[in-house]
Image: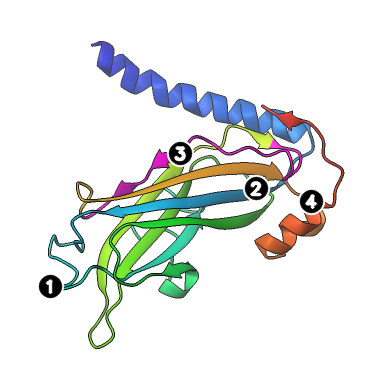
Amino acid sequence: MASFIYCILFPALVTLLVLAWADQDREQGHTFYGIETEIIDLFNNQGQISNGKFCDVMTKCDPVIYGFIDIEKPISPWPGAIRRLEDHEYIGGHTNTDNVRLNKIIGKVICGGAFNTVNLRVEVYDHDIFTQSDLIEQFNCFFVPHIVADSPLLSTWSETRVCKGIHNPNNTRLTYRWRLHALPASACGLRYNEALTLASQQKPKRAVV
């Protein structure tokens, strides 16, 4: 009974907290945001692809990583709001390694509108020169933003989290973290790095919790 009540009340409580955060944020005049995520480490200790087979017989994997911040269809099954592979941002490619320290940033400019759940979707392939590349894993990296800073200079990272693998979660893991900050209206339509440079030139204010 207790678990049933928890399953009912906890999502409702999260929703109320998100709405309260959004109301407070609107009162502060925030309608444009920058979401910044960091893909930290890829672990594939057994050197496997999505079906459990090994990447290569004699060598290790050659992982190629793509990422996409999904706020339109964050909880939908893959591919969510991704319409083509080119919608992903290329994170990097590596040769003859199963575990990779990435520390790569993916950012997104949000020009108004409401959002709560965010999904950093990450797709990893084993690159092959002579044959089609094999899927290593697709990851859902969910988070609900609950703090927004008035400036990129004041934004702080969340704790490190583990993404949810879809095909071979017991073997392949990916870690990530996120942060959120306000942007000036003039940043709308810019690439994230351009918006970040523009926002960093603004006079920093206090963070809103």
Residue placed most toward the observer, 48 or 110 = 48
Depth check, mark 1 against mark 4: the one in front is 1
**Quadrant housing residue 77:** bottom left
Q: Residues within 10 Å of mark 4 (few under 14, many from 20)?
A: some
Residue at the spot of label 3:
160
Q: Secondary structure at mark 1?
A: loop
Query: How far is disc 2 from disc 1 in space, using C-alphas?
Result: 49 Å
Q: Are marks 1 and 4 in contact (CB under 8 Å)?
A: no
Q: Are marks 4 and 3 in contact (CB under 8 Å)?
A: no
Amino acid under disc 4 = Ser
Instruction: List x then y, in percent, for residue 42.
Output: 35, 54
In which quadrant will I find the N terminus?
top left
**Is 141 situated left or right of 157 in this image?**
left
Residue at the spot of label 4:
200
| Above or below, 155 relative to 23 | below
Residue at the spot of label 2:
113
The boundaries of the magenta stretch are 149-167
Residue with the most extreme top position: 2
Instruction: Tell which circle, 2 or 3, labels the residue nearer the N-terminal end.
Output: 2
Q: Secondary structure at mark 3?
A: loop
